[in-house]
Amino acid sequence: MKRGLAVLLGVFGMVAIIFMASGCKKAVMSKPDDEVLSSFDVAMVEKTNDFGFNLYKNLARENENMMISPVGVSLAMAMAYNGATGETQEAMAKALNIQGIELDSLNKNNLALIYLLTTADPKVTLNIANSIWMVEDFKFSETFVETVKNDYQAAAKKLDFADPKSAAEINKWVEEQTRGTINEIVAPPIDPQTIMFLINAVYFKGTWTNPFEQDLTTDQRFKLADGQTVIAPTMYQSGSFDYFKTSGFQALRLPYGEDEQMAMVLFLPNEDVSLEQFQKQLNQDNWSNWMTLFETKTGSLMLPKFTMEYEKSLNQVLTDLGMGVAFEAGIADFSGMAAAGATDDIYISDVKHKTFIQVDEAGTEAAAVTSVEVGTTSMPVYDFELNFDRPFFYAIQDNETGAIVFMGSVLDPS
């Protein structure tokens, strides 16, 4: 009998992300053993970043705002990867860019990453919660379930998927983890062939280290990729920024919180360079090099406020990246999820990714009202004047681990 594994990936609230279901109450992250933290390998995070760039470039469209969470997608897929064997495991390793990494090392590194990200800055909220929801009438591998519970701090629960209340219970967990920004991810009735939901929820809320002054926000023109213009509320700030410029683009770092460990990194292609041309340069090698080029400069910044939602099935793009076998009923091999003797064929039926982000004067959060006065001097002399008045790329990155939590592009802030 062919049984489906539903994978739900999403970014909600000021950014929250969801993946394959499961869950009970709000997860509380406990500190991993010192051995796990001391063996944390940044190189594995860089592989995740590169997977994120590949995913982003395969999803990017000229006429569409978008945002994905490389961390969220990779954590969700890693949970499923623990149940894959044979050709399916090899294909997933290639697509996720984790070839040659031992499974236990991958799991322990992800455990450390979750802890390091969620404790990065007391003034920045970054919660990562995992859960696994299992149908009652299927015998799952205890090893698989315990690994997901221990190494991914996942809440686990069995439900009667035929009961409409099951979807409501999963959705309640999602709503709690995303601070009410997402209240439904599973629509009843649940497909009778679905045996499990693995869910990863990432919620981010950060205020700028130096907030924009609301009184300086004005309506400005934003030039779309096709040459047309729209009007967008545009924030203004001047002062010292981490900044650099190349022959093709300018980049600026806007930090969050007191420690400035997390930041939004913004890239504005030159007027004669399209966003599509810039995006071709996105890979971990270039990213690592760019991160070394920032210097403190004095300048002015104009950045449009924007709110956007993005939703996409990742089945096709993950197939294009090489793991199509995982979606093929009767061919996919997730026997590592099942108890010994189980005869059902398990495959991934769908991978959904949903994101939401709002950027305003206070920071990256929903319904922000904070305003801090910023003094300006008359007739300033700036090293640069940077106006994001055309399509641009951005990423939210943790400086300590190097992990890119979110990346996206704004083609139309209106």
Image (cartoon, rainbow, N blue to C red):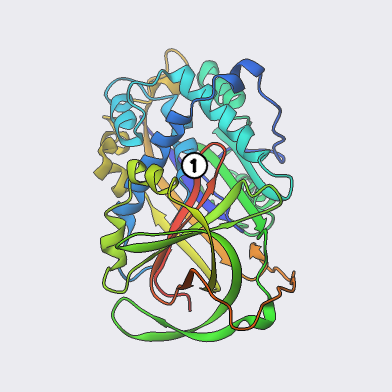
Crowd class of label 1 (few under 14; some 14 to 19; many from 20; radius 10 Å): many
x and y percentages locating residue 67 in the rendered image: 45, 58
- Compared across the picture, whether 239 is left or right of 338 comes to right
Query: Which quadrant would the N terminus be assigned to in this image?
Result: top left
- In the displayed structure, 184 sits above or below 1; it is below
Q: Disc 1 marks which residue? A: 71
20 or 110, which lies in front? 110
- Compared across the picture, whether 31 is left or right of 152 comes to right
Question: In which quadrant of the rendered view does residue 407 lie?
Answer: bottom left
182 or 15, which lies in front? 15
Residue 195 seen by the camera: no
Amino acid marked by disc 1 = Val
Q: Residue at x 60, y 44 (%)?
A: 163
x and y percentages locating residue 131 in the rendered image: 60, 36
Q: Residue at x 54, y 36 (%)?
A: 401
Name the secondary structure under disc 1.
helix
Residue 204 seen by the camera: yes
Question: In which quadrant of the rendered view does residue 119 lie?
Answer: top right
232 or 102, which lies in front? 232
315 or 142, which lies in front? 315
x and y percentages locating residue 238 in the rendered image: 60, 72
Q: Residue at x 61, y 23 (%)?
A: 37
